[in-house]
Image (cartoon, rainbow, N blue to C red):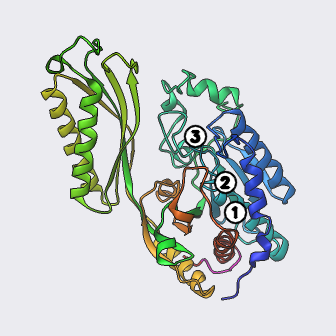
Amino acid sequence: MTACLRAEAFAELAPLLERLAAFGAEERGGVTRLLYAQPWLDAQTFLAKRMRAAGLEARFDRVGNLYGRLPGSLPEAPIVLTGSHIDTVRSGGRYDGAYGVAAGLLALEGLKRTRGTPLRTLEVVSLCEEEGSRFPLAYWGSGHIAGVYRLEDGAGAVDSDGVPLAEAMAAAGFGRSEQPDCRRSDLGAYVELHIEQGIVLERTGHRLGLVEAIAGQKRFALTVTGASDHAGTTPMALRTDALAGVAEMAVALEARALAAGDPLVATVGRLEVRPNTPNVIPGEVRFTLDVRHHRDEKLERFCREALELFAAIASRRGLTLDAQAWLETEPAPMHSGLTALLDRICCGMNLPPLRMVSGAGHDAQLFATLCPTAMLFVPSKGGVSHSPEEYTSPENLADGAVALADCLYELAYREEWPL
């Protein structure tokens, strides 16, 4: 199988990622591009202009997902979609999400230039949000496309500065009834190209990875309440120290997760200690719990037992515990036929891929409920991600982009539908 686009067609990929990283760039090298904030809006506006310069039709939907469209000669045929998300974590890297968007844009541009009009319409999407970094929800973009979210589901959601989601969305120019509806029922396939965000490919020497399933995950917001007493006058035996209780919970969680074994992972990721003063016993601690596994029944059981363990620790220490689930995504197997097509393409490039499970969540798991979906990984240096040190070499970036372009060609230009 001969590549329809060579690596040279993606010479602009690294510079395009550098250009995108300027939107939300921080002095120390990180990138913070949060949903509906000005850097996010500037990046989406830039991409819309870049899509039009590539000869694509650009449009936004009601929540700010951005599409670049290359119309096909069979307008009634299902649409072939690629892309990823444009938002970042706080002080994140340059590749997570942005890589899939940039590579998809350049792939469509290259296919249009070298192959002309496809039979089936091709689209690249820059999804508005995936990370859950600004508001207590995630997959706001793909969730609307899949019908998981409605606009009213954001009611009550506020960021750390108290700004409501609806207010931020309106300020960015979205959420209006006259804007196109987000829900899609016209998709024939979705292919997402992404950095691995782990060290497996690098450690095994593979240049490409094929995702067979994406782990499901559950996230909880928990509050432990005790008493904020004087640090010098309150005897140790008479304290109800919320932070000490949470510390015991975190250590117990780690032990349970280690005993459960791979691929289950459990993380206490954020702590807010109040009053957070040197001479006052912490009276309240808010923290997050993130648990992931690719088997739903094991994920469900571990979360239930972890919350029961936390409640027992709180009760023994005289603390109160409140736990609220705020994200739940089911494990998502990828489409076997589309994955097999990517496998053949990778092997044709003399880059046999590693079959793997993704512990990180991705928009692909939302699209898997709509249409045949597949994910392709390229290595992350040192396994680092969600960090200013996030890095993937230009050669590895090009490997993934070439494979993506070949897959899009097979899906959109061949007379016979390959799935």
Q: Name the residue under label 3.
A: 90
Residue 355: quarter of image: bottom left
Give the residues in magenta: 413-417
Helix, strand or loop for disc 1: helix
Is 28 displayed left or right of 359 in the figure? right
Which of the labelled discs sits on residue 104, or is there none? 1
Amino acid under disc 2: Val
Q: Do the residues labelled 1 and 2 touch (CB within 8 Å)?
A: yes
Which of the labelled discs sits on residue 130, or is there none? none
Real-space Cα distance between discs 3 and 2? 22 Å
Amino acid under disc 1: Gly
Q: Do the residues labelled 1 and 3 touch (CB within 8 Å)?
A: no
Position of the N terminus by quadrant: bottom right
Q: Where is residue 329 in the image (x, y as percent from the top left)?
A: 40, 49
Front: mark 3 or 2: 3
Amino acid under disc 3: Arg
Q: Do the residues labelled 3 and 2 touch (CB within 8 Å)?
A: no
Disc with the residue nearer the chain's start (3 vs 2)? 3
Real-space Cα distance between discs 1 and 2? 8 Å
Residue at 77% across / 57% down in the picture?
Answer: 16
Q: Position of residue 410 (x, y in %)?
A: 65, 78
Q: Name the residue under label 2.
A: 125
Real-space Cα distance between discs 1 and 3? 24 Å
Disc with the residue nearer the chain's start (1 vs 2)? 1
Q: Where is residue 315 in the image (x, y as percent from the top left)?
A: 15, 27
Residue 230: quarter of image: top left
